[in-house]
Each structure stands twice: as C-alpha cells, then as structure tokens.
Image: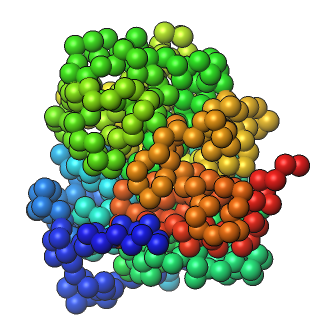
C-alpha cells in the first residue's frame, strides 16, 4: 500500500488482488465498442412494447481482477426479464429499480433505453446494470436488440465498466431472446399512460448536464488541478461538478468507449450511504420529531443491546453517528473489522448480534473508531424510534425514499437498498445503513445540493433540521464531532470533514470541507463556496487537497463564509 499524504490518496496495488489484463477494446480478438449500442436518430419503424425475455447464460465472462475471497467467475448470468412501454423512441421498463433474482450471485437493473432504425432493421438498446451480490458492486453494460415486426432477430450484451476494486470482468456476446407483444386491456392502457407520464416527469427533473470544457470556460476552472491524482483511464467511471445552478460532467467511461446513458449509469455507493442515507434520514427525523432524537440511547431503543458484550446504555444516536460508541476491540481509526459474521448474507437477528459483539473500551462520545457495523445498529435504532412514534413510514429507507428521494425527483432506479435476508428471502428485511445503495450522477448531486446549497429545503419546505444540518456541515464551531486521527480530518453525524487551513494562507478563516466518502474511490466534496465536486473510481484513489485548492480559486471559501 502506498499513501501519498499531499493528496490524501490511498492507492492499493490491484495486482495484489489477482491478474489485471491490459485495457482494450476487443475480447478474444473481436473489436467491440459502445458505439454499436448507442442510439441512432432515425425513428424505428416498429415498436418494442411488451415483455422481453433474454438468456445470456451461454455468454462467457472474461475475468480481469478478482480478490481472493471471491469465487472464480464460473457462474452464468440469470435470465433478464423486462416489460417495456414505448414512449416515442424511448423504451421504459414498467417496473423500475433492483430486480432480485433466484441466482446466488446476480441481481440487475434495467434502465430506460431507446429505439431507432438501421437500414431494414429496427434496433433498440437498454442500459443494464449487473449487481454482484456478494460485494454489492455494480457492473454497467448495454443490451442491443435487433428486431422487425414479427420477431427478435439478434440480442447482444456488452459489459465493461464498474466502480468496484473487488472484481472486474468483461462480457461480450450474443444471447437468445423471446418477445411477447402487448395485448393490453383498458386498465393496462391506463397503467401504461401512467408509466409514460412518470417517465416524462423524471426526464424533466434531471439536471441539465454541461461539459467540463464549459465549466473551465465559464469559471476559469483549473481542471488539471481539480483532477490531480485521479485515474486518466476507464478506472475513473465519472467525475463532475455542480456550481451556480449547473451540473457539469466529464461523461461516463467504459473499457469499450463512452457510456451512452450516462445519466442512468448506476454506481455503487459504498460508505457514502452513511451520509446520504443515514445522516440525512436522521436530520429529517429531527425536523419532524425534534432534535432530541439525537439524544435517544441505543440501550433504550434496542433490547438486543442488553445482553451484548459492550455497554450501550448511554450510547446515543449522536455518539454512534460520530463513530464513537466506545465499543470496539481494534482501536485503529479506520480498521473497520468485521465483527462475527456481520458481512455474511444473514438475517437481522444474526447481523445485529454480530454488530453487538464488540467489548466496551471507552466512554461513549469520546473516541473515534470507524465501524460500519455500528451504522447498522444505528439504522435499527432509528427504525425502532419511527415505530414508537407511529411514523407513516417505520422503515428508515422507506422514510428516506418518501421524504427525500421522491421529492428530489431522483431516478427510481436508485430507490433501493441492500437489506437483510429474512425467512430465506433475499433483500427482504432491514436496510444495512452504512452501505448497500446505488447512485446516478444526478442523484448524488441532488442530495449534496440539498445539504450544501438548499439548506435542507425541498420545494419550499424545510425537511432537514437546520441545527443538525449546520453541525453536519461544520457550520457550528461548538459541534465538530470527533477528530479521527487520520490526516487531521473530523467525523460528525456520519459525515467526514476536512479542516483545510493547513493547505494555505488563503484559508485563514479555518473553513471545513464536508465530504461523503466510500470504498474503492468514491468521494463527494461539499465546498464552503457552494461548489460540489464528485468522482467515482475503482483505483482506490482518494485525492482531495488539490481539488479543494482549485475550488477556492473559483470563489474564495473565506469570502463565501463571511457574514452578510
């Protein structure tokens, strides 16, 4: 491992995880490109409305990287089943979001695609995200369907992108498909009209996207400084800015060319979920029920804590959100070890028992030790609080979806989370909390904008408690959270923060930069001057100092923070 302090970059040699093949645009000597899957302009002569069943089980998976604890890629893809509604050239799945399969490894998401005409053949493509269940990684690809008025002529798949350092692979080949055209009842036609209307509303709500070149032109941005330390190849899935009401994107990369559905590229959240889901949900609960929710104790809310190895009677939701439960056996700040069988695909009871297995070590609220399992305890406590207060939604993630995600008009494809397995049913129980979500670029920008720029207000309504949000965003000097013993950073309310005064005299006012951060190479910087900067990579690159300096050049942080 190499740690480059000036950039706060952690680079882990991928060769330690297995053989890494050279980046290429061919598989087994066959040239492939996303261009073949990218929508054309000519309107298709034939519609593709109905149920599509695709079998890619004979398509080979070419492994590129695999960590030793994962099984070899000798498994097959599950059937892909999607029911489509046509809306002009758009093809919209009737059911959006995560499709849970019976396969032990794979789930999938199919996004809205497009149809067009190529000569005598009608063609469609659909964005496909394969979700590798053991580590919750997303692997983005495309499906191409060639068809006529009678039948499906050819179906192809291309997968060559992921935000995942655990496992990488390419999938290129042809499958078999059957298609059942709709014979819709009156009720079915009404439902299809609803699907079309919802899709039109969703498209209208997507933030317009501008190029990096435009960002550089408009604000004199030093793009080279911003992107210092990031991969310059397809290890970087995407990067972007939000500033002055505009979303600027560098596009979405794959090993086979640009991804044509960048707004729908689904990327693994990893621990950004701790901020964007858990922290935001608790701030929304504080707004609804009062800020005293932070003072509620784990000992009171969760009976399972009574007979645990640690001491939880005085641990508050505020303490555990600061990663300061005081219950741990490894005092290293970022070891994040697995207690018991916590990371196994178990039920709530077993996962919670594992999370509660740490012994007591320090007084609560006094010592930072980063433990993802503690966030699962936090989510369970929040669920119990919602039940006791008879909230309309007593599941934290559904509460988050109804109060935050839907009002923000994010894609329904990200309104899902990983959950415990109950009664043998995959993904049917309690949300993980500290991981297990997925983002589109549009979605993560909207959540960061809610926290940084909109001050917790959606459509004119205050949905996040102002005081709790102010502390989370390091605007309350009396509540910084705790020092992390990691490059001088702080952690408060499930959110990282970087005190950047040491980066130069221009930061004389001692500003903090709140950060959402996730494994693999995922970061969202919420700069004090109102600039949001995000990136998703799987090279384990976490640069930050240069981007902070570059952001300050656009508008000085100390000017932005000055009273009045």
**Relative to 330, 419 lies left or right:** right
Q: Is residue 104 above or below residue 173?
A: above
Between 532 and 247, the one lying in front of the other is 532
Between 358 and 144, the one lying in front of the other is 358
**Relative to 286, 113 lies left or right:** left
Please name the residue shown 35% across and 61% down the image: 520
Q: Position of residue 25 (x, y in %)?
A: 33, 85
Q: Is residue 296 above or below residue 226?
A: above
Please name the residue shown 54% across and 10% down the image: 389
Q: Is residue 415 above or below residue 442?
A: above
Can I make out residue 69 in this image?
Answer: yes
Can I make out residue 191 in this image?
Answer: no
Q: Position of residue 29 (x, y in %)?
A: 22, 90
Q: Is residue 423 above or below residue 160?
A: above
Using the rendered view, name the quadrant where residue 344 is placed. Answer: top left
> In which quadrant will I find the N terminus?
bottom left
- The residue most toward the right is 564
**Relative to 135, 68 lies left or right:** left
Please name the residue shown 66% across and 55% down the image: 511
Q: Position of residue 52 (x, y in %)?
A: 37, 54
């Amino acid at each position: 491992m190499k740690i480059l302090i000036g950039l706060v970059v952690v680079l882990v040699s991928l060769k330690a995880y297995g053989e890494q093949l050279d980046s290429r645009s061919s598989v087994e000597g066959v040239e492939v490109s996303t261009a073949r899957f990218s929508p054309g302009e000519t309107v298709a002569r034939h519609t593709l409305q109905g149920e599509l069943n695709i079998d890619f089980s004979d398509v080979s998976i070419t492994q590129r990287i695999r960590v030793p604890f994962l099984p070899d890629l000798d498994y097959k893809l599950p059937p892909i089943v999607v029911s489509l509604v046509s809306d002009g050239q758009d093809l919209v799945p009737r059911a959006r979001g995560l499709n849970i399969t019976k396969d032990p490894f794979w789930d999938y998401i199919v996004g809205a695609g497009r149809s067009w005409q190529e000569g005598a053949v009608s063609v469609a493509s659909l964005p496909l995200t394969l979700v590798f269940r053991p580590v919750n990684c997303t692997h983005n690809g495309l499906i191409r369907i060639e068809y006529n008025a009678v039948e499906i002529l050819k179906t192809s798949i291309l997968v060559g992108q992921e935000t995942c350092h655990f496992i990488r692979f390419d999938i290129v080949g042809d499958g078999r498909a059957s298609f059942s055209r709709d014979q819709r009842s009156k009720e079915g036609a009404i439902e299809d009209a609803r699907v079309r209307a919802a899709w039109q509303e969703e498209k209208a709500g997507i933030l317009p996207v501008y190029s990096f070149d435009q960002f550089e032109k408009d604000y004199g941005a030093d793009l080279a400084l911003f992107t210092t330390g990031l991969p310059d190849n397809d290890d970087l899935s995407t990067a972007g800015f939000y500033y002055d009401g505009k979303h600027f994107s560098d596009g979405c990369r794959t090993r086979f060319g640009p991804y044509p559905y960048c707004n729908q590229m689904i990327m693994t959240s990893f621990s950004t979920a701790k901020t964007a889901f858990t922290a935001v949900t608790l701030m929304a609960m504080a707004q609804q029920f009062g800020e005293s929710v932070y003072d509620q104790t784990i000992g009171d809310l969760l009976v399972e804590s009574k007979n645990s190895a640690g001491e939880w009677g005085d641990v508050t939701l505020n303490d555990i959100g600061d990663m300061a439960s005081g219950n741990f056996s490894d005092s290293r700040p970022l070891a994040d070890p697995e207690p018991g069988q916590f990371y196994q695909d178990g039920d709530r009871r077993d996962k919670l028992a594992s999370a509660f297995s740490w012994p007591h070590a320090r007084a609560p609220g006094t010592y930072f030790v980063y433990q993802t399992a503690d966030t699962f305890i936090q989510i369970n406590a929040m669920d119990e609080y919602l039940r006791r207060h008879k909230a309309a939604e007593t599941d934290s993630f559904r509460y988050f979806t109804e109060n935050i995600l839907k009002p923000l008009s994010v894609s329904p494809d990200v309104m899902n989370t990983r959950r415990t397995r109950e009664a043998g049913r995959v993904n049917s129980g309690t949300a993980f909390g500290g991981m297990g979500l997925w983002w589109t670029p549009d979605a993560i920008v909207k959540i960061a904008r809610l926290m940084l720029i909109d001050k917790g207000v959606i459509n004119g309504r205050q949905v996040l408690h102002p005081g709790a949000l102010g502390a989370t965003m390091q605007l309350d000097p009396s509540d910084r959270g705790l020092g992390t013993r990691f490059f001088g950073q702080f952690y408060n309310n499930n959110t990282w923060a970087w005190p950047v005064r040491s980066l130069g005299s221009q930061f004389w006012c001692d500003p903090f930069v709140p950060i959402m951060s996730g494994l693999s190479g995922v970061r969202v910087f919420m700069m004090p001057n109102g600039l949001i900067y995000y990136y998703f990579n799987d090279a384990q690159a976490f640069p930050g100092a240069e981007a902070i300096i570059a952001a300050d050049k656009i508008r000085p942080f100390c000017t932005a923070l000055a009273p009045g």
